[in-house]
Image (cartoon, rainbow, N blue to C red):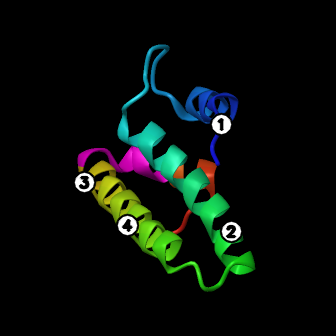
Amino acid sequence: MLTKTKKSKIVKDVQVHDTDTGSPEVQIAILSKRIDELAVHLKKNAKDNHSRRGLLQMVADRKAHMKYLEKKSPKRYNSLTKKLGLKK
């Protein structure tokens, strides 16, 4: 589970300005962390289909945010993918 302190650390790492909490970069970073944690959970609990569905929804949501960011600002998209270690 993503605690408040973990979430604030993620936001500070990728935020565009000081009060940024909803930019595509922040949303993608938070979703990526949640996806990583849920993937670890699913490796231990292979039959947890409800969580698997949530994981697939988060992956689709992150993909939509990334597509939007790539279209609006390729430079910001490229820097974010390098920072988070995501590949297309």
Residue wearing tag 3: 71
Q: Earlier in the sequence, mark 3 or mark 1?
A: 1
Residue wearing tag 4: 57
Determine the residue located farthest toward the right in the rendered image. 44
Query: Nearer the viewer's eye, disc 3 or disc 4?
Result: 4
As drawn, is 48 to the left or to the right of 50? right
- Under tag 2, what secondary structure? helix
As drawn, is 67 to the left or to the right of 11? left
Query: Nearer the viewer's eye, disc 4 or disc 2?
Result: 2
Residue wearing tag 2: 41
Which disc, if any, is residue 38? Answer: none
Marks 3 and 2, Cα distance to the nearest angstrom? 33 Å
- Under tag 1, what secondary structure? loop
Quarter holding residue 9? top right
Which of 7/26 is in front? 7
Q: Relative to 40, does residue 82 appear above or below in the rendering?
A: above
As drawn, is 86 to the left or to the right of 61? right
**CB under 8 Å between callouts 4 and 1?**
no
Question: Where residue 85 appears, x then y in whole percent?
Answer: 63, 59
Q: Give the residue type that dot 2 points to.
A: His
Marks 3 and 1, Cα distance to the nearest angstrom? 31 Å
Marks 4 and 1, Cα distance to the nearest angstrom? 20 Å
Query: Nearer the viewer's eye, disc 3 or disc 2?
Result: 2
Marks 3 and 4, Cα distance to the nearest angstrom? 21 Å
Which disc, if any, is residue 3? Answer: 1
Q: Which of marks 1 and 2 is nearer the N terminus?
A: 1
Determine the residue located farthest toward the top in the rendered image. 18
Indicate whether residue 77 is drawn in magenta: yes
Indicate whether residue 74 is drawn in magenta: yes
| Residue at horizontal 37 percent and vertical 66 percent from the top | 57
**CB under 8 Å between callouts 3 and 1?**
no
Question: Magenta residues?
Answer: 72-78
